[in-house]
Image: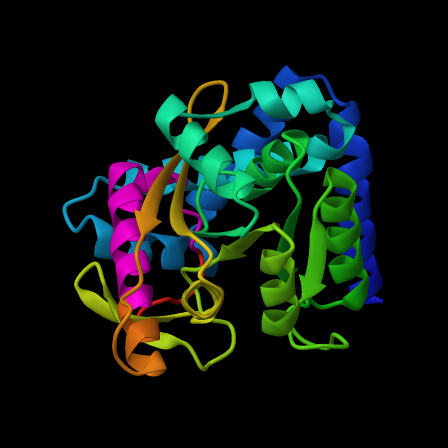
């Protein structure tokens, strides 16, 4: 019964929120964020500890702003399936230099690996990619209950992306992703939190954590260009900054994977430090 209620809750979110006038929806989601801040539950406390690792001298209003940013992500996610291609193009942006660089590497036909932390609205970034007529694939954590996972897969597929399950698929995700890179796809992967328990240990904001090895392995094995992607909110857009990562070419594979993953962690840290309120990390991260 509990699982069914959760499934119905998400289904209602996608159906109801998109029908509300945007100003009304914004007020409702911000109010929910402010209630979560006042309640100071486990997720809020974890966000506070994570932000303190990023910015030890922070004012606690950063936690409130972080929850508001997270609420904005959910509001936009619930409304995305009803938006137009032109909306996706207009509501997302990056510098002309970054756009030209990304367009160039995709045109080369070798694919591209885009690794990003849990920042801004990564679903809006994906919708923008496919609205540029670029093929993309990603990997989704298999959520519980299964019905919620299926709703998230259907939601992202409706936006135009291919979605592979992290576990339980017919083939290993890395094998499929390598094939997609050979076919010229953009492979987009969240890279700041290890879900496999087999991640690479890195230094991150003065502490130790583990990050997934997948982006580094794919880039090294296939030769596809690798970028760390920084996302953040402005008043009207999700903006992106791309940072090119060049994996080392010498040494054992595990050494190169570790070094490349550390380079990604360093690039993630730059963006998170610039706009910590848009980093939606409400789970334990540091070892």
The residue positioned farthest toward the front in the image shown: 108
| Rendered image quadrant of residue 64 | top left
Q: Position of residue 124 (x, y in %)?
A: 59, 35
Q: Residue at x 56, y 54 (%)?
A: 187
Tell me if 227 is positioned left or right of 172 in this view.
Answer: left
Tell me if 37 is positioned left or right of 14 in this view.
Answer: left
Quarter of the rendering occupied by the N terminus: bottom right
Q: Is residue 169 magenta?
A: no
Which residue is at the front of the view, 220 or 189? 220
Q: Position of residue 80 (x, y in %)?
A: 69, 32
Q: Position of residue 135 (x, y in %)?
A: 66, 44
What segment carries the magenta color? 260-281
Q: Main secondary structure of the magenta part?
A: helix
Q: Residue at x 70, y 46 (%)?
A: 161
Which colour assignment does the render follow? rainbow
Q: Up-down: is 275 above or below 174?
A: above
């Amino acid at each position: 019964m509990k699982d069914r209620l959760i499934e119905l809750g998400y289904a209602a979110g996608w159906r109801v929120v998109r029908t509300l006038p945007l100003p009304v929806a914004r007020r409702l989601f911000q109010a929910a964020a402010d209630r979560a801040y006042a309640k100071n539950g486990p997720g809020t406390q974890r966000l506070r500890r994570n932000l303190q690792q990023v910015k030890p001298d922070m004012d606690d209003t950063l936690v409130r702003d972080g929850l508001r940013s997270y609420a904005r992500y959910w509001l936009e996610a619930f409304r995305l399936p009803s938006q137009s291609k032109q909306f996706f193009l207009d509501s997302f942006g990056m510098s002309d230099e970054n756009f030209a660089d990304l367009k160039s590497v995709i045109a080369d036909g070798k694919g591209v690996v885009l690794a990003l932390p849990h920042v801004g609205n990564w679903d809006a970034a994906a919708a923008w990619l496919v609205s540029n007529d670029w093929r993309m694939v990603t990997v989704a954590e298999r959520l519980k209950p299964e019905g919620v996972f299926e709703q998230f897969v259907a939601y992202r597929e409706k936006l135009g992306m291919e979605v592979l399950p992290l576990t339980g698929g017919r083939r290993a995700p890395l094998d499929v992703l390598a094939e997609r890179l050979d076919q010229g796809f953009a492979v987009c992967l969240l890279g700041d939190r290890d879900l496999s328990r087999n991640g690479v240990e890195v230094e991150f904001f003065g502490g130790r954590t583990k990050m997934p090895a997948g982006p580094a392995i794919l880039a090294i094995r296939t030769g596809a260009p690798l970028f760390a992607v920084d996302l953040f909110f402005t008043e009207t857009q999700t903006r992106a900054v791309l940072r090119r990562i060049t994996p080392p070419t010498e040494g054992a594979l595990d050494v190169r994977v570790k070094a490349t993953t550390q380079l990604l962690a360093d690039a993630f840290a730059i963006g998170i430090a610039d706009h910590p309120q848009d980093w939606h990390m409400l789970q334990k991260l540091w070892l």
